[in-house]
Image: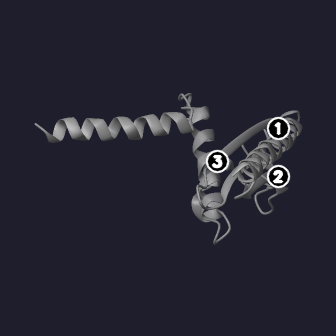
Amino acid sequence: MIKLALIVAAAFVLQILLSMQQMRHFSNEFVKLRRQGKVACGRKAGGFHAGAIVMFLLDDDGRIRTARKMEGVTCLARVRPMEGFEGRHIAELTEEDGPKGHRNLRKAIADASLTYRKYVAGEVIPEPPSPFQKVGRSVGGIFRRKSTAKL
């Protein structure tokens, strides 16, 4: 039993270290792009599928100069170049512009375009809920349903 606990603890620590390394890599890549100009980001959490984050370096007119992506299920995913978007206007991108078979990457591209359009329009860009907030809403929803069902 103690061996199993040690193995689980070691796996947990390894996962934390690899996640920290991944976050540092992403942060460094974002800073590199940010030093060159405006950057639009889009993200889509994966759950059991590969999650995706896209970053577009933009010129002053909203045209894409460089595109980067990070997609994967594990903490071993890294930021990689994404071809085919250079010269396009970010506000015109839709899910259909992404590669076929990469559902979350396509949604992240659409999210980056929507975020840019909201930014240009002066709208507030909401922060996504944290995992704890999602759990709290789910649990709160269960209790609300039970109390309204009794009425």
Q: Position of residue 73 (x, y in %)?
A: 70, 58
Q: Position of residue 61 (x, y in %)?
A: 73, 40
User: Disc 3 marks which residue?
Assistant: 43
Name which of mark 2 and mark 1 comes first in the sequence. 1
Residue shown at the point (53%, 35%) measured from the top left: 132
User: Disc 2 marks which residue?
Assistant: 79
Q: Position of residue 18 (x, y in %)?
A: 82, 47
Residue placed most toward the observer, 59 or 15:
15
Query: Is 141 situated left or right of 63 in this image?
Result: left
Mark 1 burial class by Cα count in 10 Å: few <14, some 14-19, many 20+:
few
Q: Position of residue 126 (x, y in %)?
A: 54, 32
Query: Is 126 situated left or right of 39 in this image?
Result: left
User: Disc 1 marks which residue?
Assistant: 27
Name which of mark 3 and mark 2 comes first in the sequence. 3
Q: Is residue 61 visible?
A: no
* C-alpha gap between disc 3 and disc 2: 13 Å
- Amino acid type indicated by mark 3: Arg
* C-alpha gap between disc 3 and disc 1: 14 Å
- Amino acid type indicated by mark 1: Ser
